[in-house]
Amino acid sequence: MNRFFTRALLQKLGGLLFCSFFSVQAQAQQVLTLEQSITLARQHNVALRQAQYNTTKADVNLRRTQFAYLPTLTARADASRINGLTFDNVSGQVRRGNTTTSNPYIVGQLVLFDGFSRYFELKKAAAQAQAGKYNQAQAEIEMEATVTGYFLQAILDRENINISKDRIALLQSQVQKMEKLEKAGTRTEQDVYQLKSQLATEQLNLITNENSYRASVQALALQLNAGPDANYELQAPTTTINISAPLLPLDSVLARALAHSPQLKAAKASLDASKHSMKIARSGLSPTLSLDGIVGSNYSNNIQELNAETNTYQKIPYFEQLDQNQQKIVQLSLSIPVFKGLNSHFETQTARLDLRNAELDYVAVQNQLQQTVQKAYQDVLAAREKYTTAQANIEYADKAFEAAKRRYEAGTIDLFSYMESLNNKNKVQAELLQSTCEFYFKHRILELYQG
C-alpha cells in the first residue's frame, strides 16, 4: 500500500532526524512538528489575531445597537452672569446691573418610531458580527494552509540539501579515485578537471538549497510570529496517507466546499448587511416620534421675598429657589424631515451602489472558491500520478546508477554518461519527495475547504 513516505524515504528521513538530534543538542534548536507549528500560529499569527480582534469589535458594535433601544438620560446645569440691561426670565422683569441665573435640568427621551432605523441597524450589526466570525474561521483556514505550505517546502529544501551532500560526497570520492587513475596513466587530466567542475557546481547547488531552506524556515517563523531569534529543527510529518485511495467526485467536493466555506458565508453575511444599510438609508426619509420627560428648575439672584420679621426683601437661597421653581414636563415630539440638502437621497444612492458591489463580491468569492478547489483537486491527482511514476522509477534509477558507476570506474563509459545516470537518480528522488509533499499539501487544502 502506498503511504505518505516510502519505506526507503522514511529510513533516509529517519537518519536525518537522528543526525538532527545531535544538532539540536549542540545548537539548542527546538524540534518542531507540523501540528506544533499550526498550534503556535493559532496563538501568535498576526493576521489571525487581527481577525479575532475584528470579530470582537463586531460583537461590541452588536451590543451597542442592542442597547440603543434603551431611553437616553441627559443631565445638564449652567450658570451665567450678565452685566447691564437684560430681561430676567426667572423673575419676569427687565433688570439693569448684575444678573446671575442658573437652569439645571434632566431630560429623558424614548424614541417611539424612527422609520425602523434602529431595527435595521440591529440587523446590520448582527450580520456584520456573523461575517466577522466567518472571516476569523477563514483566516484560520488560510493560516493553516500557509503554515503547512512553508513547513513542507522547508522539509523539501532540507531533503534537497541532503541529496546535494550525497552527490558531493560521491563526487569527492570519485575525484580521489580519478586522481589515482590519472597518476597511474589510465585516465587523463581532463577527466579529473571535469569531475572537479561537477563537484564545484554541486557545491554551489548546496549553497542555493541551504539558502532556500533558511528562507522557508524564516517564512514559517514569520507566520508563527516567533521573532528573528527563532531556531527550529523541523520534524517531517509521520502521519500516513494512502495516496492511492480514491477521491470523491469533483462535483461532490465542490458541493461540500461551497456548503462549508466560511469565506462564502462571510460574503453572504456582508451582503445581508448591505441590504440592511439600504433600508437604513431609506428610513432617513421617515418621521421620528419620541416621548420626552424633563425635570428641571431655575435660579435668579433677582428673586427676593419679604422677611416678615425685618419687613425687608432678601434674596432666596440657591437650593431653596430650585425647590420652589421645580418643573416637570412630559411631551411628545414629532420630527418630519422636509429638506436636508438631499442627504437622504444621496445616502440611499450610495447604499444601493454598495449593495450592488456586495452582490458582485459574493459572486466573485464563489467563483474564486470553485477555481481554488478545482485546482487543488487537479493538483492532488497530478501529484498522485507523479508519485506513482517516481515510485516505480526510483528502484530502476538506483540500479541504473549502480551499473553506470561500476562501468565508469571500469572505464567503459565516459563522465557524461555517468553524470547523466546520477542526475536521473537524484531527479527521481527529488520528484518522489516533491510529489508526496504536494499531495499532502493539496489534499490538506481540500480537507480544509470541505471542513
Image (spheres, rainbow, N blue to C red):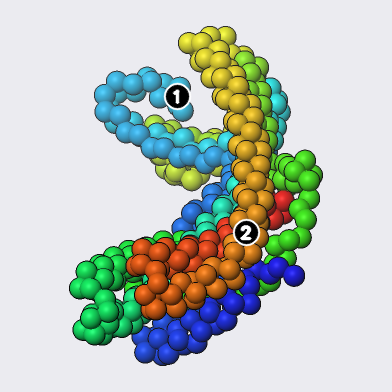
| Three-letter residue code for mark 2 | Thr
Query: In the rendered image, which quarter is residue 373 located in?
Result: top right
Compared with residue 6, is residue 118 higher up or lower down, i.e. above or below? Answer: above
Q: Position of residue 145 (x, y in %)?
A: 57, 56
Residue found 57% across the figure and 9% down from its top: 338
- Check whether the beta carbons of the residues at disc 2 and disc 1 lie within 8 A of each other: no
Report crowding for label 2: few under 14, some 14 to 19, many 20 or more residues within 10 A (C-alpha): some
Compared with residue 158, is residue 22 higher up or lower down, i.e. above or below? Answer: below
Given residues 408 and 134, the one toward you in this image is 408
User: Is residue 337 something that shows in the picture?
Assistant: yes
Given residues 35 and 58, the one toward you in this image is 35
| Mark positioned earlier in the residue sequence (2 or 1) | 1
Q: Which residue is mark 1?
A: 89
Residue found 32% across the figure and 33% down from its top: 81
| Three-letter residue code for mark 1 | Asn
Given residues 436 and 142, the one toward you in this image is 436
Quadrant holding the C terminus = bottom right
Residue 169: which disc?
Answer: none
Query: In the rendered image, which quarter is residue 177 located in?
Result: bottom left
The residue mark sitting in front, 2 or 1, is 2
Residue 389: which disc?
Answer: 2
Q: Position of residue 247 (x, y in %)?
A: 76, 53
Given residues 42 and 16, the one toward you in this image is 16
Q: Position of residue 36 (x, y in %)?
A: 56, 73
SS for tag 2?
helix
